[in-house]
Image (cartoon, grey):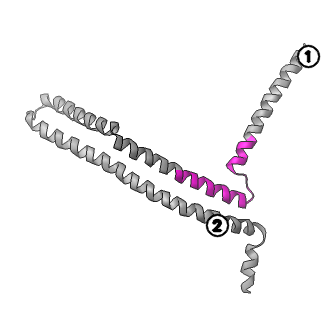
Amino acid sequence: MSNKQQTITATGPFRKFAVTAKKLSTETIEMNEDMTEFNSRLTAYYKQLADTWNEAQKEYSRKVPELPNDIENMEASKRIWIDMFENYFTKLFDSSEFAENFGKLVTSELEIAKHWNNMTAALLESANMPTKKDMDEVYQELHSLRKRIAKLEKIADKEVT
């Protein structure tokens, strides 16, 4: 009876799945490494935003008490707040540290998506279903056929007239 489990995975769709299981586990391990990178970059990204927000808020809080707290000065207070935050965040977004971290964040996100796509393709192949690559080839061939039909219709219309 214990051999029946081994024979089940050696037949039918389970055989294909058993073959792709190694690929899936490899992709999962690599994706987890990329997820770790992504999470550390995301943490750094939000830390940069929070630090900049706090610095701008401190500077705003330092400048606002200089203005009297009445309705006429509310517009001036709002303008100071906008200017402070605009200046601080512009400095942040122009900094090389932010650009480097954001670039690595996007790169790691794309790597994770690549792993998901590879895993999905492997699962679809093991289930004998068309993959994205297969569908792209079909769409490309369909587009080519439509162009050829349009040319043939033009030639046929010229011959009729």
Q: Position of residue 7 (x, y in %)?
A: 76, 77
Tell me the chief SS of the magenta region: helix
User: What number is the disc on residue 159?
Assistant: 1
Above or below residue 96? Residue 3 is below
Nearer to us in this view, 122 or 139: 122
Q: Which mark is residue 22?
A: 2
Q: Amino acid at mark 2?
A: Lys
What kind of element bears circle 1?
helix
What segment is highlighted magenta in the picture?
111-138
Instruction: Locate residue 129: give its quadrant.
Output: bottom right
Quadrant occupied by the C terminus: top right
Q: Amino acid at mark 1?
A: Glu
- Residue 149 lies in the magenta stretch: no
Q: Nearer the viewer, mark 2 or mark 1?
A: 2
In the displayed structure image, the side of residue 95 where residue 21 appears, left or right: right
Is 133 inside the magenta-drawn segment? yes
Q: Residue at x 9, y 38 (%)?
A: 65
C-alpha separation, residue under disc 2 versus residue under disc 1: 59 Å
Q: Total label count?
A: 2
Residue 21 on image: x %, y %: 65, 66
